[in-house]
Image (tube, rainbow, N blue to C red):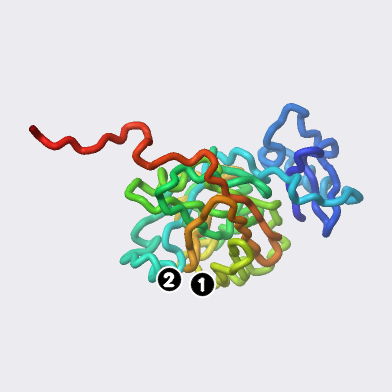
Amino acid sequence: MKVGVDREYGLVVIQGDLIAPVSDVVGVPSTERDPLRWLLEHPDRDALLDQAGKAKADLPLVVERLAPPIARPPKIIAAPVNYLDHKVEMKEQSTIADYGVFLKAPTSVIGPGGVIELPYLDKRIDQEGELAVIIGRSGRNIPRESAFDYIFGYCCLLDISMRSTEDRSTRKSFDTFTPIGPWVTTRDEISDVGALDLVCSVNDSVRQNVSTADLIYDVPLLVAYASSVMTLEVGDIIATGTPAGVGSLNDGDRVRVHIDGLGALEVGVSAAAATLYSSRPGWAPAVEPA
Ligand code: MN
C-alpha cells in the first residue's frame, strides 16, 4: 500500500494516478495534524490499515498537494558515511562503524513541493539523496533477523547538509532540511530493500545514482544498531545515508530524488531568507589584545 497525506483530503491511499481519501474510513480526528502518525499509533492499526487498503481510489493524485507523510516524527535518526564512494569523496577516514548515528531535528521536515530555505549566503549547502525507513513498531535491542517486523515502510528523503565546523546535528537540522515523501510505501510492497536504485538530480542533471546494495550498514543492520542505542518509536524515521555525488544548492534549484517503488520527491531551493554567516547570533570576531 502507498499511503500519504493530502492537504485537502487528509490521509489518502494512492493507487497509480488516483487517490482514495481514507481519513473518515479510519476515523482520524478532524483536528489531527499528523494523520499517518496518528494511524500508526492507533491500537487497531492493522485492522484500520486493512480497511483503508480496500477504499476505492477515484480522485486524481496531485503530488504538489501532498504534505510530508509524517509531519512530526518522534525523532530522525541518520547514518553518516554509509556508502564507500561517499567516504572517498568526503576524504573521510571513518564510516558509520566508527561514527555511529546522529539525530536531526523533527522540525526540519518538509514535504513534496516544499522549499529548502538556505540559511546563509556564504556557506556551502549540499543535497544528500537517501532512502528513508519509517518505524512501525516500538523496540529496543532489535535483532538484525527480526528488524523488518519493526519497519512500517519506506520513502525518499533529502538530508540537506551545511558544510561547516558545527556538529552534524546543527548543520543538518535547519528548518526545511529534511524533505520526505512523496508518500510511504509499505514494507510488503518492496521485495528487496537492499536492491533499490536511487537517483538524485538537481535541475535535471543527475548527481547521485546508486543501488542500496552498496550500503555499508544495510537496513536491518541500521535498525539493529540504532535500537541498540535508543528505543525506536512508532513514526521514527531512519535516514540511511547518501552515496557519492553531493553538491551545492543555490537559489531557484529544483532537487529530485527517485527510488524504485517509492516514487519521486521533488522540492525547490530558496535563498530569500539567507543572511551572512557572520550575522548569526553568538558569533563575534576575535578581538586583538591591546
Ligand atoms: Mn546524510
The reply, left or right, for residue 180 in relation to residue 10 is: left
Question: Alpha-carbon neighbours of circle 1 within 10 Å: few (<14), some, or many (≥20)?
Answer: some
Residue lying at the far left of the rendered structure: 290
Secondary structure found at label 1: helix
What amino acid does circle 2 point to?
Leu
Callouts 2 and 1 close, C-beta under 8 Å: yes
Name the residue: 32% across, 32% down: 282
Residue 102 numbered tag? none
Ligand 1 is within 8 Å of the C-beta of the residue at disc 2: no
Name the residue: 77% across, 55% down: 1
State whether residue 20 appears in this view.
Answer: yes
**Which residue bears the numbered disc 2?**
84
Along the line of sight, which residue is nearer the eye, 24 or 8?
A: 8
Secondary structure found at label 2: helix
State whether residue 223 appears in this view.
Answer: no
Tell me where residue 83 appears, x and y as whole percent. 46, 68
What amino acid does circle 1 point to?
Asp
The reply, left or right, for residue 166 in relation to residue 126 is: left
Residue lying at the far top of the rendered structure: 31
Tell me where residue 39 appears, x and y as whole percent. 71, 40
> Looking at the picture, does residue 176 appear above or below residue 238?
above
**Which residue bears the numbered disc 1?**
214
Along the line of sight, which residue is nearer the eye, 268 or 101?
A: 268
Tell me where residue 255 appears, x and y as whole percent. 60, 57
